[in-house]
Image (spheres, rainbow, N blue to C red):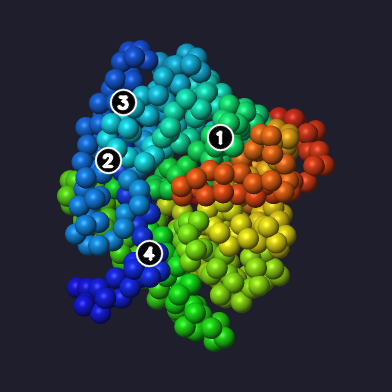
């Protein structure tokens, strides 16, 4: 039972500390939607999504009104489309037709985003995988709600460097096709190592093949709540600091568990997981950067930042797993630049560099997220940055990701505007020394020795 004191405390978190449920994401399997040709497959995909998710948005609004809990987004994730279209798509244009169908279905049911325009190529690429990857720039520039991801490495299989090389070119092409909007297409695309099957957050959400036919996953966010809790223990020992974060994470996750179970019950869809990631927004007071400052740093990026982030991430997970039996997805602390005002400020003050962010990704939930770089950055350099981040995930047996935006026409010191939850981003400085000969070797980087556990 939830006590009246917990209800009052939760209301305070919502009213003053920006606590929200960031997303209810319905995962939908499309494995049964393969038709005899592209047209029939598109029709089956559309029908399955519209039928399964017809009540998702209305249910989210009802739950929000009933409990007084803001539910910011309602989203859909689907089976990786490279698998769904493998037998019927003979060209990249065929895959783009499926992307447009996803967009149409998402608009019909009223969700904010649909993820799963994806390929899983950690060890090698099928012809269908390559066709989908090559279609990504056109798919993202010709749709509004579709999000895309590619998993190109894992601890068990190593890194597919052929895919990494290709993805540098794909990101540049996507940036060019959406350059009139500060290359916003790249905001809807992420590269993974060790991608989870049950992530509710975009742009990397897809419905894994091991999942049930349809599930409900919830992503909770509460950087402002953690920051407020830490203000009350300013100057106290690490023991008290850790206990405070754990207790706060427990309370935040309880809110997500409540919403997830209610949505599952109302929609008649199994409950999957609660992702308890601290996902910031551009709003003041809703920032992971502010938490790091409250822990004792002048700016994110100062010496001690990686240690502080490691502490934060670990305590968030320890508190969250006590509040729900099914914690999954990414879970921990996101460190995007454009979506976090104090991270933006740290970059502007030159306290935070791309290299320091990379170091921080060794201990955070994801990786290099929403990083705007000069539009002149070469495809090979982008591939090199991806390879570095994928190596961190592979060796450390964790999920890592890269969401880079080479903003065409802008250089270091300029600013890119994305709007909404995506906010804005300063263009960060990139090391321009070449890695082209390394990237062009081709083949795979083998899995690390500790992958051979069985």
Taking the spot 46% from the left edge, 49% from the top edge, the residue there is: 421
Left or right of 324? Residue 52 is: left
- The reply to whether dot 3 and dot 1 touch (C-beta < 8 Å) is no
Q: Earlier in the sequence, mark 2 or mark 4?
A: 4
Q: Nearer the viewer, mark 2 or mark 1?
A: 1
Q: Which mark is residue 181?
A: 1
Instruction: Residue 118 in the image: state x and y as whole percent.
Output: 47, 33
Label total for image = 4
Relative depth, front residue between 80 and 54? 54
Counting other residues with Cα less than 10 Å from the Cα at mark 4, is it few (<14), some (14-19), or many (20 or more)? many
Q: Which mark is residue 45?
A: 3
Disc 2 element: strand
Relative depth, front residue between 405 and 83? 405
Q: Tell me the residue that label 2 is attached to.
A: 214
Residues at marks 2 and 3, CA–CA distance in whole angstroms:
14 Å
Instruction: Residue 225 in the image: state x and y as whole percent.
Output: 42, 70
- The reply to whether dot 2 and dot 4 touch (C-beta < 8 Å) is no
Disc 1 element: helix
Q: Earlier in the sequence, mark 1 or mark 4?
A: 4
- The reply to whether dot 2 and dot 1 touch (C-beta < 8 Å) is no
Taking the spot 56% from the left edge, 49% from the top edge, the residue there is: 424
């Amino acid at each position: 039972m939830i006590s009246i004191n917990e209800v009052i405390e939760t209301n305070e978190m919502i009213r003053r500390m920006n606590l929200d449920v960031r997303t209810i994401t319905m995962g939908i399997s499309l494995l049964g939607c393969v038709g005899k040709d592209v047209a029939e497959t598109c029709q089956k995909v559309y029908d399955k999504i519209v039928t399964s998710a017809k009540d998702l948005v209305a249910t989210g609004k009802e739950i929000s009104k009933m409990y007084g809990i803001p539910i910011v987004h309602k989203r859909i994730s689907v089976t990786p489309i490279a698998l769904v279209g493998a037998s019927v798509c003979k060209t990249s244009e065929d895959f783009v037709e499926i992307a447009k169908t996803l967009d149409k279905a998402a608009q019909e049911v009223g969700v904010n985003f649909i993820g799963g325009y994806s390929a899983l190529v950690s060890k090698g690429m099928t012809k269908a995988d390559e066709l989908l990857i090559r279609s990504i720039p056109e798919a993202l520039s010709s749709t509004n709600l579709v999000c895309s991801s590619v998993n190109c490495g894992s601890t068990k299989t190593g890194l597919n460097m052929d895919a990494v090389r290709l993805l540098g070119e794909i990101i540049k092409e996507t940036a060019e096709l959406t350059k009139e909007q500060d290359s916003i297409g790249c905001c809807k695309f992420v590269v993974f190592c060790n991608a989870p099957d049950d992530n509710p957050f975009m742009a990397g959400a897809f419905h894994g093949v091991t999942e049930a036919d349809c599930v409900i996953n919830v992503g909770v966010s509460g950087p402002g709540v953690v920051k407020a809790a830490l203000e009350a223990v300013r100057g106290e020992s690490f023991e008290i600091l850790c206990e405070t974060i754990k207790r706060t994470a427990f309370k935040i996750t309880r809110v997500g568990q409540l919403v997830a179970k209610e949505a599952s019950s109302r929609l008649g869809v199994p409950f999957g997981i609660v992702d308890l990631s601290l996902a910031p927004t551009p709003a003041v007071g809703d920032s992971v950067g502010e938490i790091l400052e409250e822990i004792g740093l002048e700016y994110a990026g100062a010496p001690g930042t990686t240690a502080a982030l490691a502490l934060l991430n670990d305590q968030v997970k320890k508190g969250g797993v006590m509040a729900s039996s099914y914690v999954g997805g990414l879970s921990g602390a996101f460190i995007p630049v454009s979506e976090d005002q104090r991270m933006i400020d740290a970059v502007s003050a030159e306290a935070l560099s791309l290299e320091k962010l990379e170091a921080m990704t060794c201990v955070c939930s994801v990786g290099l997220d929403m990083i705007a770089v000069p539009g002149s950055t070469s495809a090979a350099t982008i591939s090199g940055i991806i390879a570095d981040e994928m190596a961190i995930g592979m060796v450390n047996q964790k999920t890592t990701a890269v969401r880079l935006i080479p903003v065409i026409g802008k250089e270091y010191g300029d600013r890119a505007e994305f709007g909404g939850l995506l906010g804005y981003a300063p263009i960060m400085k990139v090391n321009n020394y070449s890695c082209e000969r390394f990237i062009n070797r081709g083949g795979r980087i083998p899995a690390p020795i500790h992958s051979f556990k069985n």
